[in-house]
Structure formats: C-alpha cells, structure tokens
Amino acid sequence: MADVITPTKLTHALSHHTKDPYTVSQLIHYFALELPKSSNYPRHARAYVDYCLQKGGVPDASSFAQYTTDLPPNRVSPIRKFMLFYQRIGQPRVVPDPKPSKIPPTANDLIQRFIQEAKTLQGERSRQTYTKALTTFFAYMNRQQQMGKPASLSGLTVTEFVHHLLKENYSPFTINLYLSAVKQLAIWCIGQREALMLTEIQLSNLGDIKAVRGLTIDRRTVSSTV
C-alpha cells in the first residue's frame, strides 16, 4: 500500500529543516499537499506571502492583521489556515522565488550537443523542431524544480510532461513529436554514458523514458503544425 502523506507526517518532515529557507513556491507547494487539488487556498496564501516579502516583513500576526483588514471572510479563511500550517512547521524563513530562466545553461548545452551529433535528424527544419521540443521539456522541468517538485530526465517526469502538454491544449500530433524528441535525446545520452559520466540511477531513469506511451492520433485530421 502506498505511503500517504498526512499533515502529521508532513509537519514532522518539514520541522526538521526550519533553519533552511523556503522559496515562496516551495512553501506554497507543501501547504497545498494538505488541501484538495481543486482548492484555491494556495493561490490566496501565495498572494499573502508575496505581500509580506514586498513589505520587507514575514508572515506573522502583524502582517496578517494588516493584509486581511479589508478582506471578506472567504478571503481571510485561506490566510488563517496557511498561518496555522506555517506556525506548525516552525515558521521557516521565506525567500523570493529565483528569477525564472527558460532553461539552465547545462540543459541548453546538452540540447545543442545532441542536435549537432544526432544522426537521425535530417535537415534544418528537423533540428529546429527538436530544439523547440527539448527546450519546452527542460523549461517545464526547470519550473517544477523551482517549485520544489522532483523532476529529472526520467520516465516519470516525461509522463508528467505529456499530461502538462495535454492540459495546455497541445495537439496529440505535437505532443507525440515532442515525446519523440525527448526519447531520442534519452537514447543519445545512454550512448554517451561515459562522456556524460552518467550514474547507474541516471541510466535507469533514461531507460524508463522508452516506455512512455504517446497519444492516439486520428490520421484523418493530421494537419497540425508545431
């Protein structure tokens, strides 16, 4: 049976790291774990934490009173619940999220090397398409990591990436094309295992990408462009 993350377990885990700062996204991510997925409480809590940082303060009784003075009760409830959570985990220091970058330099270097060396890519258009697909994937992975979520070049992250593209209304044709690009990158990385100094865990994660399934396409409507 899978181990369920309960508020008690979460509090116990986080309370051991109160000396380490949390980014806004990390803090809100952990708060959201206690709530239904459809809850809008994290959005209101983030607005409050952003307010505190902009004012040079911290989430406490004083900032709570100032922020909620003119808010209706349904807007105060999310902040009050967040404050209880924040106090329960030991009131860790909160820092702003790092400025977002499209992809880390190391990821960009990996893409460029793959594009230059991949023998399966024929023509400039194919190289541009694969570059766009892989940049989109690594940008997604980078955002997940910045929010404190686990993400890597692995089957699990690639599966989540496919679901993300679906939610963003990408066509099945484009999703499969992007998935193919990531799979080809994984195959290339495995072939370059020594040059890239990959660990056994990284090789296993790369191997799992092969099993990620694409989407069924209605061949009669394949006229999409990337």
Image (spheres, helix red, strand yellow):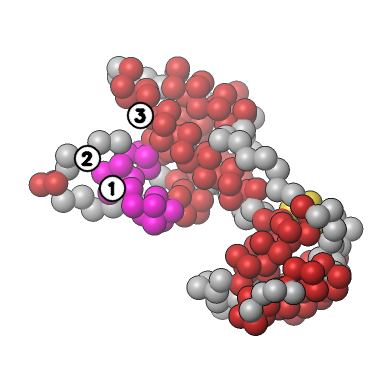
- Disc 1: which residue: 171
Look at label 1 and name its amino acid. Answer: Ser
Magenta residues (range): 162-180
Name of the residue lying farthest toward the left: 220
- Disc 3: which residue: 129
Residue at 73 percent of width and 78 percent of height: 80
Q: Earlier in the sequence, mark 1 or mark 2?
A: 1
Quadrant housing residue 141: top right
* Label 1, residues with CA under 10 Å away: few <14, some 14-19, many ≥20: some
* Alpha-carbon span between mark 3 and mark 2: 13 Å
Decide whether residue 121 is among the magenta residues: no
Give the x, y percent position of residue 151.
Answer: 58, 49
Comparing labels 3 and 2, the label whose residue is closer to the camera: 2
Residue at 22 percent of width and 40 percent of height: 224
Q: Is residue 15 visible from the viewing direction of this image?
A: no
Name of the residue lying farthest toward the right: 19
* Label 2, residues with CA under 10 Å away: few <14, some 14-19, many ≥20: few
Circles 1 and 2: CB atoms closer than 8 Å: yes
Q: Quadrant of the C terminus?
A: top left
Look at label 3 and name its amino acid. Answer: Thr
Residue at 47 percent of width and 24 percent of height: 114
Give the x, y percent position of residue 74.
Answer: 61, 80
Residue at 55 percent of width and 27 percent of height: 108
**Mark 1: secondary structure:** loop
- Disc 2: which residue: 224
**Mark 3: secondary structure:** helix
Q: Quadrant of the N terminus?
A: bottom right
Look at label 2 and name its amino acid. Answer: Ser
In the visual, does 220 lie left or right of 161?
A: left
Give the x, y percent position of residue 97.
Answer: 70, 48
Q: Earlier in the sequence, mark 3 or mark 2?
A: 3
